[in-house]
Image (cartoon, helix red, strand yellow):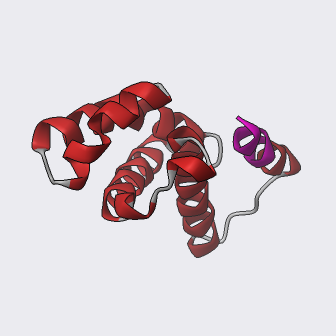
Amino acid sequence: MLTQEQFEKYLIGALNRDTESERAIYEGSVDYVYKIVLKYVSDRDDAADIAQETMIQAFEKLKNYNPSKGKFKSWLAKIAINKALKWLGKNKQMISQESAEKFFEVLKT
């Protein structure tokens, strides 16, 4: 995962649709997102799809990210968790107590 400083280095470029900045953010974040999603969705292919959707949504909403309200890592984790929970809801899977605890654990980081 990118550090906050690394992310901020690429933020302006990504907001201006600079492909190198976007690629740096994507490549520095997608594995982190995948690991979060995999805690909720056990199928690796589904988790990869959700991670991809998370990254797309994050780039679409990047202009809404406010560094004074928290770190990019936490902001991105919330998007990933919400995507995973929405997918679980659509697929009628139950969320275990352990998954709920992991949700709050991720938000604390």
Q: Residue at x 42, y 55 (%)?
A: 54
Magenta-span inclusion, residue 103: yes
Name the residue rendered at 57%, 74% in the picture: 90
Q: Is residue 96 left or right of residue 8?
A: right
Residue appearing at x 38%, y 36% in the figure: 8
Residue 57, image x and y in percent? Answer: 37, 62
Q: Please state the horizontal and vertical placement of residue 17, each as a whole percent of the image.
A: 15, 53
Residue lying furthest right: 97
- Identify which residue, 29 or 89, lies in the foreground: 29
The answer to which of 51 and 3 lies nearer the viewer is 3
Q: Main secondary structure of the magenta part?
A: helix
- The image quarter in which residue 6 lies: top left
For the magenta stretch, what is the residue range? 102-109
Q: Would residue 31 appear left or right of 103 to someone viewing this image? A: left
- 31 relative position to 78: left or right: left
- The C terminus appears in which quarter of the rendering? top right
48 and 55: which one is in front?
Answer: 55
